[in-house]
Image (cartoon, helix red, strand yellow):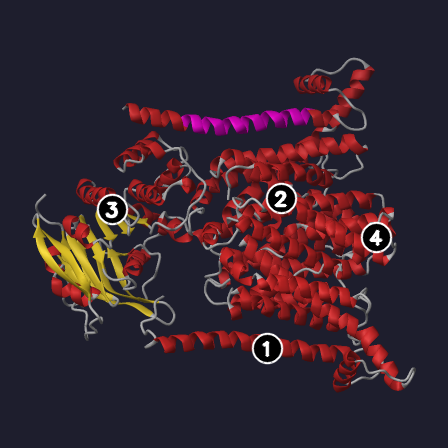
């Protein structure tokens, strides 16, 4: 299974957001997209799952351009878990999660679907909320339900926009760990936007660090998360240490002024990285 | 897996409650039918009408003159009852579909400008004698005009969704409203120059009545009602997905714009059919779905049939009341509003959780 | 979308903000001038020759109290302008202004773009009052005839508001619930009107229909002060609260935490809208369209900030009704077209055109 981002550029009418992105994601793995606010992370995800149409370039899933795939077919392959604050409506949690089975479901809700929903709820430790009303939940519970909906879709590619932003530290770790496990278990390519550099570094196979609408660095956590990179991209001084074999960032303080370097994206059609899962575990 | 079984059990109970509500509605509807055929100029008691109805269905011919008379009276009212069910069901279902599709509690089946279009069509016939049907029958001319003109605003709305690709849901509704104002203006001009009696005619047509349903057309109405149910039930799953915002709906394989446009067309067609028979009976299509939502939640799979039945119930009940209260003088549209309105207000004030 | 270029200093930023506001004020001033000019022109229409400059002259002099010799040509002109033509023109401006302002308020309270001043059901109450006045001669005023009808319209128009307030006063109620209550009330009162009409003969039905149609004809110069001050007072009251109205857009939760007592505020707003709308209806009948559409149109140019939207929409509403009324009674056409009809004929296509041309996502 292969997701190729080939020369994707996107902009709204007067502003350009993404410039000429090139990267290949090969095989099931957990990829985290990091980067400062406004750099285009959500936009990139939007382009991948066809919510947004790139002005230039294409996203290819197993060789086929996403723009050519019918919406209903694409929904069977790709799932999307939106940022937590989007809608909230009166419906039971079960029904809200069951919606994720829509691309597959027949008229009757069959028992397999229900079993899947139940298992997913248990894995996220929210099975007690099953019959509660969706719009009466706390922000963290809400986020887990939306995550469950995406998981239940059993897609080959799962895109998540800040799936742990409202969760407490225990659940942040658990959910990220779960996403990595699932990528192995279900052969899923999981792409998530994250603001927590350390948790992302602990569990991701690969990291895409974005900067000014392009890919600044892509590759294994040790290669991407360096003091130099963080200083350039985020404008933050830090120390990177080895914790249990993974890079761990200790934040120092912000720089007085963001370094405005003349930066050209290192990747283009001739040379761009192909990322795949770590061979161990 | 004890946990899973418990989960399934809970869910079954939850679904059962929904079906219970629908069944209760169905039973009440049947009761209402019997009441309906029993009431009118000659009042027949409930048990007697039930008896006569069943006997007639079994093909037993009554022996004595008195029973013969009662039988013919009761049986004569059947088409009207069936008509009420068909129309009420169509209005209820279409209202439900519009509310779910537009995610707006202000939506009712006439949102697509049907009422203003139909009024214009009728006004044209009554005041100017113009009709799209080259029919000699006055009633047929009114029906044909009402139907055709009712669809024009909806066509404009569909046109706008095609021409302006990024129009929002509210935008489409505003288009419908703009067309409605335009048509109402034309109608107003016509009414301005109309004779007093023509004006009264139009006024009563607008309020709505079931009087026009009889042996020649009741089967059509029933047929349309069933067709409407089948079509909207087919869309019910997609309607559910539409509750999400448009982006999410897309990622689950549902194109929101396409689905909304289809629904617009379907609702307009069926409502226009209903209106051409009975005029614009208000309230049924707006409030029936709401009440169902209060009891059933927002799953359209159950809401659509429930709205159909509650619509039928409301209309039947209103017609019974209309016949009983004023010897048939009061149009049914008045009763639906007068009785239903306060009831609905009461429910709104007492509701604990917001359904929107 | 974040702009890639940030203002280079805080002064720069402040300048940008002020010029942004300045633009809005320019638009509002432009509208005021438009209204002024159209009013002047409108008064010149009618039997007898008066030019625009003369119009302004006479009105100015009348306001400062110049008296003319009885039955002199000046006196005739002054009388014609002030007593015959001006009332209609002023009434149009005032009514349009008031309705548009109510529309803004209703759309903010219900957060529903389909809301207008009549979403509260006031118009159906007023129409009911007029129906029973005409059919049964029942009036709450001391006078029968037109004044009695006006009283009926006004007082009965307030009854729906009472119900709405009961619903709106519970802050847990979503905005949608308020809308629904308004709809239910509208249904109740229109059916009551229908019942009343059943006791009427056909000519009364026509009379009732014509009354509620929406027209400036019935406004006389003695009524004008009441109408003017009523609408002025209510509009000022609304404007005073325009910042709070803005808060309602955030949702009841956020608004409360920003210090707004949502339930009380909504009730107060409904009361003001009710008074304003009822007042206007009792003078002019039910004029639709402007209360819904004027806020939408101005939102395209001014944004949803009520501090600017309210005066702008009000002025647009006033100008629009005035223009339509003037067209409706222009001597070139055969007869007197009711203002609501002209508005729909002109306004609907105009509105549709604006929808086509609006920016992505704006409508």
Name the N-terminal-most of marks 4 and 1.
Answer: 1
Q: How far apart are labels 4 and 1 at the CA level?
A: 40 Å
Residue that carries the numbered disc 1 in the rendered image: C29
Contact? badges 3 and 4 (CB < 8 Å): no
Could you tell me residue A92's position as x and y percent? 41, 36
Tell which of B199 and B54 is nearer to you: B199
Q: How far apart are labels 1 and 2 at the CA level?
A: 39 Å
Q: Name the front one of labels 3 and 1.
A: 1
**As displayed, is residue A111 above or below residue B227?**
above
Magenta segment: B12-34
Tell which of C110 and C208 is nearer to you: C110
Residue that carries the numbered disc 4 in the rendered image: C141
Q: For the residue carrying disc 4, how many other residues have a C-alpha within 10 Å: few (<14), some (14-19), or many (20+)?
A: some
Name the N-terminal-most of marks 1 and 2.
Answer: 1
Residue that carries the numbered disc 3 in the rendered image: A156
Q: How far apart are labels 2 and 3 at the CA level?
A: 53 Å
Residue that carries the numbered disc 2 in the rendered image: C166
Prevailing secondary structure of the magenta residues: helix
Q: Element at badge 4? A: loop
Is C45 a magenta residue? no
Could you tell me residue A258's position as x and y percent? 22, 70
Q: Chain of mark 1?
A: C
Q: Chain of mark 4?
A: C
**As displayed, is residue C331 above or below residue A50?**
below
């Amino acid at each position: 299974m292969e997701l190729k981002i080939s020369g994707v550029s996107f902009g709204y009418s007067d502003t350009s957001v993404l410039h000429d992105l090139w990267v290949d994601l090969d095989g099931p793995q957990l990829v985290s997209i990091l980067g400062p606010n406004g750099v285009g992370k959500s936009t990139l995800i939007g382009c991948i799952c066809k919510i947004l149409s790139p002005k230039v370039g294409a996203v290819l899933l197993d060789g086929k351009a996403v723009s050519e795939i019918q919406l209903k077919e694409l929904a069977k392959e790709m799932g999307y878990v939106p940022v937590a604050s989007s809608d909230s409506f009166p419906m039971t949690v079960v029904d809200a999660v069951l919606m994720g089975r829509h691309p597959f479901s027949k008229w009757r809700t069959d028992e397999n679907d229900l079993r899947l929903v139940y298992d997913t709820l248990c894995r996220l430790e929210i099975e007690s909320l099953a019959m509660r009303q969706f719009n009466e939940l706390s922000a963290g519970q809400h986020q887990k339900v939306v995550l469950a909906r995406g998981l239940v879709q059993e897609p080959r590619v799962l895109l998540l926009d800040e799936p742990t932003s409202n969760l407490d530290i225990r659940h942040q770790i658990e959910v990220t760990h779960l996403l990595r496990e699932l990528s192995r278990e279900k052969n899923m390519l999981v792409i998530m936007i994250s603001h927590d550099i350390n948790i992302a570094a602990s569990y991701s196979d690969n990291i895409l660090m974005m900067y000014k609408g392009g890919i600044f660095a892509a590759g294994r956590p040790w290669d991407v998360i360096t003091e130099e990179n963080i200083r350039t991209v985020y404008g933050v001084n830090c120390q990177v240490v080895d914790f249990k074999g993974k890079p761990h960032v200790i934040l120092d303080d912000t720089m007085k002024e963001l370094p405005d370097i003349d930066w050209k994206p290192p990747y283009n059609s001739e040379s761009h990285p192909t990322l795949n899962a770590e061979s161990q575990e | 897996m004890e946990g899973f079984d418990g989960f399934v059990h809970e869910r079954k109970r939850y679904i059962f409650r929904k079906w219970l509500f629908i069944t209760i509605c169905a039973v009440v509807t049947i009761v209402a039918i019997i009441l309906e055929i029993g009431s009118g100029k000659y009042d027949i008691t409930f048990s007697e009408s039930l008896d006569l109805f069943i006997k007639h269905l079994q093909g037993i011919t009554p022996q004595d003159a008195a029973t013969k008379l009662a039988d013919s009276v009761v049986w004569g009212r059947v088409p009207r009852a069936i008509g009420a069910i068909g129309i009420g069901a169509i209005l209820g279902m279409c209202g439900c579909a519009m509310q779910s599709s537009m995610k707006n509690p202000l939506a009712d089946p006439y949102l697509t400008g049907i009422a203003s279009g139909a009024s214009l069509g009728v006004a044209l016939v009554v005041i100017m004698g113009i009709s799209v049907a080259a029919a000699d029958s006055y009633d047929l001319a009114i029906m044909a005009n009402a139907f055709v003109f009712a669809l024009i605003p909806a066509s404009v709305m569909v046109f706008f969704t095609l021409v302006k690709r990024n129009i929002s849901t509210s935008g489409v509704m505003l288009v419908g409203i703009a067309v409605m104002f335009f048509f109402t203006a034309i109608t107003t001009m016509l009414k301005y120059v109309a004779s007093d009696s023509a004006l009264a005619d139009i006024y009563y047509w607008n309020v709505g009545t079931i009087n026009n349903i009889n042996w020649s057309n009741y089967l059509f109405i029933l047929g349309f009602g069933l067709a409407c149910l089948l079509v909207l039930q087919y869309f019910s799953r997609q309607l559910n997905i539409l509750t999400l915002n448009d982006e999410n709906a897309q990622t689950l394989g549902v194109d929101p714009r396409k689905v909304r446009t289809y629904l617009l067309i379907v609702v307009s067609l069926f409502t226009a059919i209903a209106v051409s028979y009975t005029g614009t009976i208000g309230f049924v299509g707006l409030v029936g779905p709401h009440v169902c939502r209060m009891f059933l939640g927002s799953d359209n799979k159950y809401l659509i049939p429930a709205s159909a039945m509650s619509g039928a119930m409301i209309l039947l009940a209103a017609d019974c009341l209309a016949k009983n209260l004023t010897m048939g003088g009061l149009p049914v549209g008045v009763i639906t509003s007068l009785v239903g309105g306060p009831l609905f207000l009461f429910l709104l004030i007492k509701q604990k959780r917001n359904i929107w | 979308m974040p702009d890639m270029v940030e203002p280079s200093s805080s002064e720069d930023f402040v300048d940008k903000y002020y010029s942004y506001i300045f633009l809005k004020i320019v638009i509002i001033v432009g509208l005021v001038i438009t209204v002024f000019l159209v009013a002047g022109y409108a008064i010149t229409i009618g039997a007898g020759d008066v030019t625009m400059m003369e119009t302004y002259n006479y009105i100015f002099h009348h306001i400062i109290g110049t008296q003319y010799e009885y039955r002199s040509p000046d006196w005739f002109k002054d009388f014609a302008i002030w007593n015959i033509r001006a009332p209609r023109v002023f009434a149009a401006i005032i009514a349009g202004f008031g309705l548009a302002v109510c529309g803004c308020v209703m759309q903010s309270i219900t957060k529903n773009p389909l809301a207008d001043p009549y979403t509260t059901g006031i118009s159906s109450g007023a129409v009911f009052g007029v129906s029973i006045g005409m059919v049964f001669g029942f009036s709450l005023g001391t006078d029968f005839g037109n004044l009695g009808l006006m009283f009926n319209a006004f007082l009965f128009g307030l009854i729906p508001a009472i119900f709405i307030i009961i619903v709106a006063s519970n802050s847990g109620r979503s905005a949608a619930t308020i809308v629904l209550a308004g709809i239910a009330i509208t249904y109740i009162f229109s059916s009551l009107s229908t019942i009343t009409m059943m006791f009427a003969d056909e000519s009364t039905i026509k009379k009732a229909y014509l009354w509620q149609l929406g027209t400036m004809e019935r406004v006389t110069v003695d009524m004008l002060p009441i109408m003017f001050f009523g609408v002025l007072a209510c509009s000022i009251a609304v404007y005073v609260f325009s910042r709070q109205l803005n808060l309602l857009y955030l949702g009841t939760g956020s608004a409360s935490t920003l210090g707004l007592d949502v339930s009380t505020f909504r009730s107060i707003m409904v009361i003001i809208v009710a008074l304003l709308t009822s007042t206007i209806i009792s003078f002019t009948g039910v004029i639709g369209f402007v209360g819904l559409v004027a806020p939408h149109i101005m939102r395209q140019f001014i944004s949803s900030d009520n501090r600017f939207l309210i005066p702008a929409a009000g002025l647009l509403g006033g100008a629009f009704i005035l223009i339509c009324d003037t067209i409706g009674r222009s001597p070139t056409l055969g007869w007197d077209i009711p203002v609501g009809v002209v508005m729909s004929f002109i306004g609907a296509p105009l509105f549709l055109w604006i929808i086509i041309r609006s920016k992505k996502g704006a409508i």
